């Protein structure tokens, strides 16, 4: 049997070589999408070798030096040979990189009007003829723009773009493109599932881990220009001299890559590490403390980005502890960093136990403060009004704050999507959030237009992603978890990109170009989010998770200190039906939306089925679009979610042998876990909701293997056993 398997592997290798496909080899995933293996397609390789015989680059800055290193590394790998680098133009087809001030050749092309259109971070990639020779040009106004252009050029090569008619003008649509690391100073990571924190605080600032540079390279390749180093549930010690000096080393490493560092700030830091008796934002001593602290930080980190603050939320202290508003609290910090060009990102994730509907809290608390925040404050709003659920309607704060800079917060880490054990590509979710129409200024007032500033002309625009990185060798735990980091960066730069297009890029850059691999992998990615919704929270159900870890199902959760921490608070299942009434007959949360949006959700019969139970308490016998009753449709969706995962497994099995064995086997094993978990979710939820509908599981569906009581007990132990 072993000899037979070896023979099959040998024949496969010969077959792949005969097709001109590079032999698959072990790859642990560390290189992410920055794999620079030689291009296997001979025609493409010949075109690129002919077009790029020299690199012309004057690396007279740290950033241009990084561009030189990356382009040299990338081209030598992709083209299979070293490409000479010069500072002077020669009479050979060359790749010219730089700015008008760093490159005489670029200065001679008179690109000022075109360069003006791409701003400080954008770039041009074009073909130009100079002295009778054809050259490729990466031109920018700034060194970091040239770096971004270099990474994009390598992306074009890795995706086999034809260079004959290349003409790219690219600029970021959003100003602040930031990763939020929920990393603690003890190196644990809240909602992190890929190992301990990247930041080795005990050895900083003396030891410079090479991984820090690779992290910066990966972010710069996507145009991510900021990173918040510590958890929003902030340890006040982050603002001490000890940790400022440690963070300075990271800032020094990140700076040439165009990345600023930010700190999450604990609002009670003046008391807890500053020795004051109060943290009241209107106290003059407190105000001076923050100004002195900002001066201290900027002395060490001249390009420090500013603060991220979680205040008066989930036990975190804030200005309301002193009877002050969020605006009064945020503005004191904003005044401290303003002289240095810093910003304050103030999170709008707030909810109180007294609120009838947690959905309403953020809007009710912040809309009355519109226009009262300083210009260098950005209100950071999650995509939905609850908490990064598999599907949520867009947060009503988007479009409701014309006088307050507003940024979008997305979750890259999979807190509610099976951690790093489930394959869940967030492309459809992110695009759903970005393309949601707020109607704030009529049709077409999308969330994307709110956060890019085109709707309200904000002073600052931003987007944040809660990072999914850790010390796991492949950075994200699940090999496909890398795609969500990549996705966030690409959409932060250009939110008009499609989810499918980004998935295609990532697959080709991370694995290979074989269509027999690319297409099934892309199909798996594109169906994975909806599959996760179906076996967890179909038809607008939400927050059915076990509390604490948020991994497995626990729709029966009811006995907790706060009702909005329970599952029954959200689904409200009873003998009559299921769902949360947010119309005028219930919490009336829909009044927070513009009339056009309210109209979409107001009537049960008109509400899109994916949001039906978000906004209505629906009778079990309500007729759905399929002709099924609500109960029958709910069961069908849960079972369909499991079948979706099985389809994903079959598609993955079809690509065996087309990539390295290590990553193939890893994903295969994780998909087995995902199928088991999907069945667990399906059986637990269907059996539990059946106790209210009092209706049988329709014929044709496999019956749950165990009783409801079994799944209730499983919830108490399964997470621990799994992790």
Image: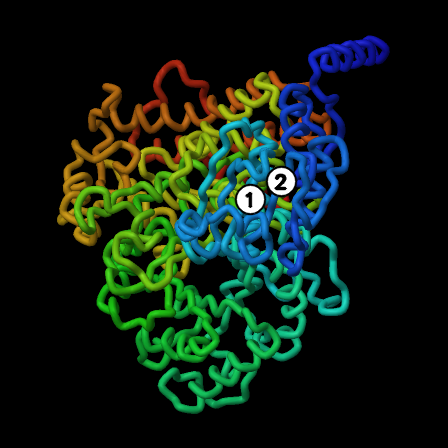
Q: Quadrant of residue 667?
A: top right
Name the spot of residue 306 as percent of width and height, x first. 48, 69
Residue at x 77%, y 15% (from the top left corner): 13
Left or right, 540 with respect to 72, comes to left
* Observer able to see residue 561: yes
Name the spot of residue 432 as percent of width and height, x first. 35, 39
Name the spot of residue 16 as percent of width and height, x first. 72, 14
Image quarter where the N terminus lies is: top right
Q: Which residue is mark 2?
A: 95
* Observer able to see residue 349: no
Q: Is residue 676 above or below residue 140?
A: above
Observer-nearest of 404 and 201:
404
Q: Is residue 453 above or below residue 329?
A: above
Left or right, 156 with respect to 315, comes to right
Observer-nearest of 613 and 709:
613
Residue at x 53%, y 32% (from the top left corner): 505
Residue at x 53%, y 27% (from the top left corner): 164
Q: Is residue 139 above or below residue 75?
A: below
Label of residue 353 in the image:
none
Observer-nearest of 141 and 479:
141
The span from disc 1 to disc 2 (Cα, nearest Å) is 7 Å
Left or right, 427 with respect to 581, comes to right
Name the element at disc 1: strand
Name the spot of residue 464 as percent of width and height, x first. 45, 54
Q: Is residue 320 above or below residue 613?
A: below
Q: Could you tell me how many numbered marks the image carries? A: 2
Residue at x 47%, y 83% (from the top left corner): 291
Q: Which residue is mark 1?
A: 138
Q: Quadrant of residue 616?
A: top left
In the picture as drawn, the residue positioned furthest to the front comes out as: 131
């Amino acid at each position: 049997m072993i000899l037979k398997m070896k023979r099959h592997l040998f024949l496969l290798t010969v077959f792949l070589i005969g097709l001109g496909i590079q032999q698959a080899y072990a790859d642990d995933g560390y290189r992410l999408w920055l794999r620079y293996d030689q291009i296997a397609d001979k025609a493409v390789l010949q075109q690129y070798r002919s077009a790029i015989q020299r690199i012309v680059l004057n690396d007279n800055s740290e950033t241009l030096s990084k561009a030189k290193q990356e382009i040299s590394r990338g081209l030598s790998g992709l083209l299979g040979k070293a490409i000479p680098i010069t500072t002077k133009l020669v009479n050979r087809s060359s790749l010219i990189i730089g700015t008008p001030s760093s490159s005489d050749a670029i200065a001679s092309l008179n690109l000022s009007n075109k360069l003006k259109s791409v701003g400080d971070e954008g770039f041009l990639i074009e073909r130009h003829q100079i002295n009778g020779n054809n050259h490729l040009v990466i031109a920018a106004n700034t060194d970091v723009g040239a770096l971004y252009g270099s990474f994009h050029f390598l992306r074009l090569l890795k995706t086999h773009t034809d260079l004959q008619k290349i003409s790219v003008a690219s600029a970021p649509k959003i100003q602040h493109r930031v990763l939020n690391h929920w990393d603690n100073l003890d190196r644990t990571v809240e909602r992190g599932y890929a190992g301990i924190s990247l930041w080795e605080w005990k050895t900083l600032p003396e030891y410079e881990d090479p991984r820090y540079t690779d992290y910066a390279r990966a972010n710069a390749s996507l145009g991510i220009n900021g990173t918040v180093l510590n958890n929003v549930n902030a340890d006040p010690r982050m603002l001490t001299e000890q940790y400022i000096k440690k963070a300075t080393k990271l800032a020094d490493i990140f700076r040439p890559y165009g990345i600023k560092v930010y700190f999450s700030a604990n609002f009670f830091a003046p008391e807890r590490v500053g020795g004051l008796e109060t943290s009241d934002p209107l106290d003059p001593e407190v105000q001076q403390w923050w100004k002195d602290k900002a001066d201290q930080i900027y002395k060490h980190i001249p390009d420090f980005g500013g603060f991220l603050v979680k205040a008066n939320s989930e036990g975190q202290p804030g200005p309301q502890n002193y009877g002050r508003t969020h605006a009064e609290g945020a503005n004191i910090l904003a005044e401290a960093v303003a002289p240095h060009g810093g910003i304050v990102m103030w999170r709008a994730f707030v909810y109180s136990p007294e609120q009838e509907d947690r959905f309403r809290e953020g809007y009710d608390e912040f809309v009355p403060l519109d226009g009262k925040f300083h210009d260098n404050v950005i209100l950071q709003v999650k995509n939905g009004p609850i908490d990064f659920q598999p599907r949520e309607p867009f947060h009503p704060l988007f479009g409701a704050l014309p006088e307050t800079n507003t940024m979008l917060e997305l979750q890259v880490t999979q807190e509610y999507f099976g951690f790093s054990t489930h394959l869940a590509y967030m492309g459809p979710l992110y695009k759903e959030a970005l393309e949601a129409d707020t109607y704030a200024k009529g049709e077409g007032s999308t969330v994307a237009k709110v956060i890019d500033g085109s709707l309200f002309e904000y002073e600052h625009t931003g987007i944040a992603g809660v990072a999914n990185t850790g010390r796991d060798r492949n950075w994200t735990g699940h090999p496909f978890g890398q795609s969500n980091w990549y996705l966030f960066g690409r959409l932060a730069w250009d939110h008009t990109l499609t989810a499918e297009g980004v998935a295609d890029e990532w697959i080709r850059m991370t694995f290979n170009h074989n269509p027999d691999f690319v297409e099934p992998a892309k199909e798996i990615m594109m169906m994975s989010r909806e599959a996760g919704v179906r076996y967890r929270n179909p038809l607008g159900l939400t927050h059915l998770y076990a509390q604490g870890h948020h991994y497995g199902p626990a729709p029966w959760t009811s006995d907790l200190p706060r009702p909005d921490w329970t599952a029954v608070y959200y689904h409200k299942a009873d003998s009559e039906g299921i769902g949360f009434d947010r119309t005028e007959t219930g919490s009336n949360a829909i009044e927070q939306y513009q009339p056009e949006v309210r109209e979409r959700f107001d009537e049960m019969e008109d509400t899109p089925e994916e949001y039906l139970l978000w906004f209505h308490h629906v009778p079990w016998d309500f007729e759905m679009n399929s002709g099924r009753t609500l109960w029958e449709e709910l069961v069908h969706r849960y079972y369909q979610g499991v079948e979706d995962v099985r389809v994903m497994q079959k598609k993955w099995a079809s690509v065996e042998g087309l990539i390295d064995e290590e990553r193939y086997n890893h994903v295969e094993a994780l998909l087995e876990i995902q199928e088991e978990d999907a069945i667990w979710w399906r059986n637990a939820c269907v059996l539990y909701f059946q106790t209210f509908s009092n209706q049988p599981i329709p014929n044709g569906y496999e019956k749950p293997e165990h009783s409801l009581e079994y799944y209730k007990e499983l919830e108490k132990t399964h997470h621990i056993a799994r992790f």
